[in-house]
Image: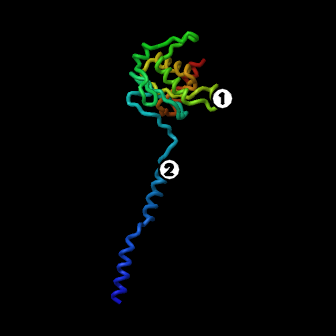
Amino acid sequence: MHAKRMARRQKREKAGSKLNLVSLMDIFTILVFFLLVNSSDVEVLQNNKSIKLPESVAEKKPENNLVIMVSKNDIVINGRLITTLEDAQKNIQENPDQGFEEIADLKKELTYLASRKPYASEDARIKGRDVTIMGDATIPYTVLKRVMTTCAASEYRNISLAVSQKHVEEGELAGAEAVNAEVGE
């Protein structure tokens, strides 16, 4: 009897401990629900501390496309420095056909990026490529105009400007609409 008891004991100790998967599955279930609840449809653009976006009451969400960041000092695409604003103002090339001023370094980069991604259809070619410009609120309009002109000349005609959404009370919005109506007349 003693031998049987010793054999059972050794067999039990040899089997080792078993992993309890119930607790692990509970943790993952809670994690999945947490991630589902906290995910949102807010589009977050690349963040750059040197750019302070202008504010707007626009409600349309940005699309995920090429982002050009124009800070007080630099023009950056996809985290890569293209040119400084000082150099951009020096290296302006006149477009003799339309009289527009384009930024040469930016045009070169946009043309390269366009060549790497062919159009999906003829409708896409007519519409043009999508681009979002994140321009600092303090940059001069002439610089922004040159960036937009360069984008349009490089087949990036569907241009969006990134802004910070400003929350407006209903009374303030009605006042702004009244001002816009008076200006429109």
Q: Position of residue 171 (x, y in %)?
A: 51, 31
- Where is the N terminus found, in terms of image quarters? bottom left
- Where is the C terminus found, in terms of image quarters? top right
Residue at position x 39%, y 16% from top? 86
Observer-nearest residue: 51 or 125?
A: 125
For label 1, count other residues whose C-alpha is less than 10 Å away and answer few (under 14), some (14-19) or many (20+). few
Q: Which residue is mark 2?
A: 36
Q: Position of residue 148 (x, y in %)?
A: 52, 21
Up-down relation of residue 154 to residue 45 (above or below):
above
Residue at position x 35%, y 80% from top? 9
C-alpha separation, residue under disc 2 versus residue under disc 1: 36 Å
Determine contact: label 2, label 1, CB under 8 Å: no
Q: Earlier in the sequence, mark 2 or mark 1?
A: 2
Q: Which residue is mark 1?
A: 123
What amino acid is at disc 1? Asp
Residue at position x 44%, y 34% from top? 46
Up-down relation of residue 36 to residue 13 (above or below):
above
Observer-nearest residue: 52 or 9?
A: 9
Up-down relation of residue 26 to residue 48 (above or below):
below
Can residue 165 be spotted in the picture? yes
Residue at position x 59%, y 19% from top? 184
